[in-house]
Image (cartoon, rainbow, N blue to C red):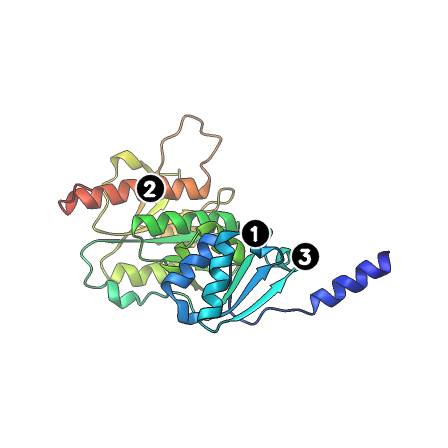
Amino acid sequence: MRNKKRSKNKKQDQVKLPRGRHVVGIHSCLEVIKVRPKAVHSVWLKEGWEKHGDLQKIKQWAQENSVRLSVQDKYFFDQIAHSHQGVCLVVNERPHLDIQSLKNEKSCIVVFLDGIEDPHNLGAILRTCWLMGVKAIYTPHYNSAGLSPAANKVASGAAEHVPVEEVSNLAAELSKFKDLGFWVYAAAFENSESLWQTEFSEKVVIVIGAEDKGIRKPVLKACDHIINIPQIESSASYNASVATSIILSEASRQQHFANGLSK
């Protein structure tokens, strides 16, 4: 029995996805089809797809648009992501930000993530950024979560709207935004002011660090303001995605009022 199982797994391991961005999850895949249908290279469905209405819709779309369609078992999908909902799209593109396009923006927000390694955190932050109208997310090349299938799944379609830019030097990238009139706000405790007392500028960069290590010193040094979210227990900390949501909500609220918007 053991030899048969190893032989079976070896055979399945030979089935590999084409190169590209692998998007899993029903909501994420439906958003890809909606936003960038021509970028879909292939569609993979899990055995038993006939029982799920949304998977039937995706299969029908693939057939109508002459997109390569394959069916694989649960083992194959589990190698891509633990939570996949039985579907995976291979996509040949993703959104990117031209930083110079922000030069003439009156008000906007960009988020920098320093050392966020959990793809679920990145996915949750992505979804919040989409709904808050954030222009882009910047992360380091190394020791940081990238736009993996797991992150795409949690983002539930947000990855099709908010660019995730990976750069080698966050501090140097912050300088480019400062040159375009942005002010940089870092979330930390030392020598900080309360979020509720902070007056955000019209063009904002928000920097969020890892929950355990915080923001690295070179990046923190490049920031203009250090702010904290009030809490009753100083020995604990907010989850990174929750902290991002709270700060984005306040910055967005202030920008809406500054621009005379009631909604």
* Residue 128 in sight in this render: yes
Disc 1 secondary structure class: helix
Q: Residue furthest top?
A: 232
The quarter of the rendered structure image containing the C terminus is: top left
The residue identified by callout 3 is 75
Which is nearer the eye, 142 or 104?
104
The residue identified by callout 2 is 247
Query: On the picture, is 101 further left or further right than 66?
Result: left
Query: On the picture, is 127 further left or further right than 148?
Result: left
The residue identified by callout 1 is 51
Reply above or below: 197 against 138. above
* Residue 144 in sight in this render: no
Disc 3 secondary structure class: helix
Examine the image and state in which quarter residue 61 appears: bottom left
Q: Residue at x 43, y 70 (%)?
A: 39
Q: Between tags 1 and 2, which lies in front?
A: 1
- x and y, in percent, of residue 205 in the image: 31, 52
Label annotation for residue 220: none
The amino acid at mark 2 is Ile
Q: Specify which label sits upstream in the sequence, 2 or 3.
A: 3
Q: What is the spatial separation of the Cα atoms under label 3 and label 1, in whole angstroms?
A: 18 Å
Q: Between tags 2 and 3, which lies in front?
A: 3
Q: Between tags 3 and 1, which lies in front?
A: 1
The amino acid at mark 3 is Tyr
Query: On the picture, is 112 further left or further right than 22?
Result: left
Q: What is the spatial separation of the Cα atoms under label 2 and label 3, in whole angstroms?
A: 40 Å
- x and y, in percent, of residue 262 in the image: 17, 41
